[in-house]
Image: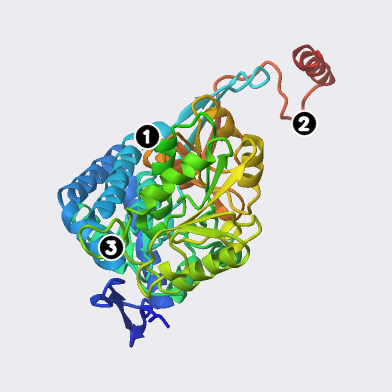
Amino acid sequence: MTAVQPKPTPVGETFDSLSPATDEVVGTYPVHTADEVSAAVERARAAARWWDGLGFAGRAERLQRWKGVLTRRLPQLCQVVRDETGKPVADAQLESVLAIEHIAWAAKNARKVLGKHRRSSGLLMANQAATVEYLPLGVVGVIGPWNYPVFTPLGSIAYALAAGNAVVFKPSEYTPGVGKWLVDAFAEIVPEQPVLQLITGFGETGAALVGSGVDKIAFTGSAATGKKIMAAAANTLTPVVIEAGGKDALLVDTDADLEAAADATVWGAFSNSGQTCIGVERVYVHERVADEFVARVVEKAKNVRAGSDEDAQYGPITMPSQLSVIRSHIEDALKRGGKALVGGVESVGDRYVQPTVLVDVPEDSEAVREETFGPTVTIARVHDMDEAIEKANATKYGLGSTVFSRARGAELASRLRAGMTSVNAPLSFAGIASLPFGGVGDSGFGRIHGPEGLREFARPKAVARQRFTAPLTLTSFSRKESTDALVAKLVTVLHGKR
């Protein structure tokens, strides 16, 4: 029987953050109560007014300076990430670099996206000047995950800050040290007001944040927890943006670069121990190239190894309870006729899970239907890409996806029911700051990143200003019958043609 790594547990009013590789205590943090959360939100309200008052230029200057601190101290940040997640420093650096890119993009583009824009007022309202601008919501609560404790929460935090909001941030109980490091670095650049605050704790602390009266909640985590957050937020009509994981598919067509597709499959499935919401969990490959593709994947997968040493490609499973999920999915696949070409049940240890490549797995098995969130991948042969699309879309999730095809990449991408698709490269949409990130179905709704991410944390304000008195007065009880008749004729001329 395998040993189970203990979950962080409260000790009085504090809890310990543990290394998933060694169980060593790497930090101790407070369990913030509901009253303390409410107090943080109240402090944030005053800070939000001050932060908004800096304007786009003032906020951009502070965000760029924060980005500089993160960049110059990158090795330090990566070590904190490694300590709490166990992932290799190189992987910690990759997610941190992408997060820095997002801070830079949000700071640079906030004015262009959210600033005042003119709109057409139309012929009937030609005497009006129409404008729209996006104003800050006020205070945004961000509940972050543990798998990418820098990249993912900053995808909400940076855009919310650039839009003029204050943020109260609750990181996962598995990675509170990363959250504290980020918030402390921001406080060095913005010492005047608590514009970005940290709260730590467990589910109760997160629930307190949802019910605290914040103006929006941004959550990343499981679909089950996302539904609970939505239900709680409904009591106060608090809007939410939810990114709730996925069961992402990769499609391989007959004309695909099989070497690149195999490499993308292995990296997308096993990097970060498979603990990636947009990771590759299912592959559908055209039968004409399936044998060669599978052989390439198997050969590459055999050279990938989990461990804590410098040569390991990925680290331990961060959340101990996920080990049983991974094991059960592999067991179910094998019992139902699937074959493990690499790995298998024996790959699941007490901390690490070695790569597993499964074939001939029924489509209604757990390994195909449910999010595994571990270093496993299923590969299925299909007769054509129509079958691949049908099977890829036959899921309750719809987050990311990947297509490898030289001739039909864009066409196949447009047919996938997913919020994002990468063509001929793995997960590239996540690194492009101008692209929105989010899903459909049980993968959640709302978007972070890009212009859509900035607007997610702002409210549109429409203003119509009369420039001169109109010859036809439409909004008055003194309106004449002749005016109504003239308007009817005008509308017929403008819009009555078939």
Q: SS at mark 3?
A: helix
**Kind of residue indicated by mark 2:** Phe
* Real-space Cα separation, disc 2 to disc 1, in angstroms: 41 Å
Q: Earlier in the sequence, mark 3 or mark 1?
A: 1
Tell me the crowding category of disc 1: few under 14, some 14 to 19, or many 20 or more residues within 10 angstroms, Cα based. Answer: some
Circle 3 residue: 178
Q: Nearer the viewer, mark 2 or mark 1?
A: 1
Is residue 397 left or right of 79 when viewed as pictured? Answer: right
Label 1, secondary structure: give it.
helix
Residue depicted at x 21% and y 63%: 309
Q: Nearer the viewer, mark 3 or mark 1?
A: 3
Q: Residues within 10 Å of mark 2 (few under 14, many from 20)?
A: few
Foreground residue among 244 and 24 = 24
Give the side of residue 480 with respect to residue 54, left or right. Answer: right
Q: Is residue 70 visible?
A: yes
Mark in front: 3 vs 2? 3
Q: Amino acid at mark 3?
A: Val
